[in-house]
Amino acid sequence: MSKLQYLLLDQNSIRGEIPHEIGNCVKLLQLQMGSNYLSGEIPPEIGHIKNLQIALNLSSNHLHGSLPLELGKLDKLVSLDVSNNRLSGNIPSSFKGMLSLIEVNFSNNLLTGPIPNFVPFQKSPKSSFLGNIELCGEPLTPPCASSHSSDSENYHHKVSYKIILAVIGSGLAVFTSVTVVVLLFMMRERQEKEAKAAGIEDDATNNRPMILAGNVFVENLRQAIDLDAVVKATLKDSNKLISGTFSTVYKAVMPSGLVLSVKRLKSMDRTIIHHQSKMIRELERLSKLCHDNLVRPVGYVIYEDVALLIHHHLPNGTLAQLLHDSTKQPEYEPDWPTRLSIAVGVAEGLAFLHNVAIIHLDISSGNVLLDSNSKPLVGEIEISKLLDPSKGTASISAVAGSFGYIPPEYAYTMQVTAPGNVYSYGVVLLEILTTRVPVDEAFGEGVDLVKWVHTAPARGETPEQILDARLSTVSFGWRKEMLAALKVALLCTDNTPAKRPKMKKVVEMLHEIKQN
């Protein structure tokens, strides 16, 4: 049981008390025990399950007693539901320790007292707290009047006490007051000097928003990644690296010296904002994908309606920059083996995604990143899980991908599919072979790279004339491999989706080219 990650026991008519040994399931990510007949108190040992992240659901049972203070230690927990029970007492202020909390439901219990001043509570709907007659405070409309009157009573007692103290030891009080004022003045002066030295007077930094949720998935990076520094980096235009269809990427240097890439999602689809717990679950799963040719998230930050995804920084930029940006390569160096390795790596990454039922929404050379050894990594893999095109408000091009890579069938199917991914990959492969951009006025009006290549015979051009001559003329071996890869690209970009090979087959064909 110590290795158990998901315990889903909701709606099973289970009776009795929750065993205290539940705290031994230290690897649990999700605990669902709602809609049963559970009785007794909530075991405080649940607070020992530090990995609990996706949800803790104990709703619709017969639980009584107070909410354990220990639950406040669940700093990764995203969703908490204890509604429809007989829980009593206050909502503990220790719950402010639930730093990742987004969804809560305390409704229909016997809870009393003020709701703690905690952003996830105040941002929750009133329905999350209704049904507790003696519960008060934001977001509920009735203010905590009783606490106000008791505060007033306490105030009068304090005033009387201060008068007695003033009469007995006025000299001591004056001395203490002067000392405190002097110390405060000195501390303030010191803080102002430190603030100026550190450049904290910058308006953007001073107005940095409050983090609502955040987590680092990789254990050995948690000490090195400062979430405040992550947010701060995205507030400066000087840190901007690239802007894509679905996101803008920033460079972030941590106080530890670690360099990261931070992706700020564009709010084209409201599901990102309104379903944050689902988003976090998907990110957690994607972070566990094991493939060398995928860019996986290492963490996230959420503030206001903004979602930031944290990745390792890849210093060599994108495949698009390598192929088309002359500033990235001032002196051209023909290297077909490197390009072929990149083509194979991208194909293997996409084949893996298809194998785990993930369809990429934006395959392009701009979303293929290169590490220090020019190994390709497919980026934007999170978007397919965070966006729901059928419910979104994004335009056709935004959902289907970047202009020039969109498969022709999307115009009438309006669906992103695996064969559509193969088409987009074929465009990337044509870029690698021709060093031409997907859309160029030089092709002629209404002609893109795919059409330009497919209509070459009609123009009287040979396949050799399509290839980048700076590569194909270096050696007979290179030209032979490039022509074989061109055949693969033509298959991938066939107008009929059913005629395109699967990505797994594409990988096999490219490996055969390398081996021969």
Image (tube, helix red, strand yellow):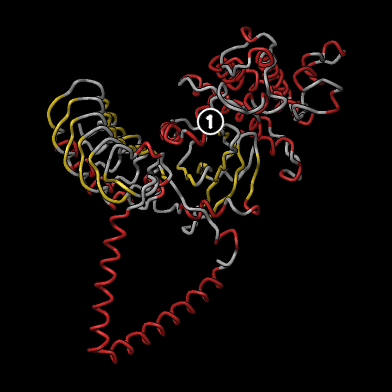
268 sits left or right of 254 in the view: right
Q: Which residue is mark 1?
A: 381
Residue 168 in sight from this viewpoint: yes
123 sits left or right of 25 in the view: right
Residue 270 picture quarter:
top right
Viewport quadrant of the C terminus: top right
Identified by mark 1, the residue type is: Ile
**Which sits in the foreground, 232 or 405?**
232
Residue 262 at what x, y percent from top left?
55, 45
Residue drawn where x is 25% and y is 89% of the image: 169
**Which sits in the foreground, 415 or 499?**
415
Seen in the picture, residue 421 relative to 250 is either above or below; the reply is: above
Seen in the picture, residue 474 relative to 499 is either above or below; the reply is: below
**Which sits in the foreground, 310 or 306?**
306
How packed mark 1 is, by other alpha carbons closer than 10 Å (few <14, some 14-19, many 20 or more), is many
Residue 359 at what x, y percent from top left?
54, 22
Secondary structure, mark 1, is loop
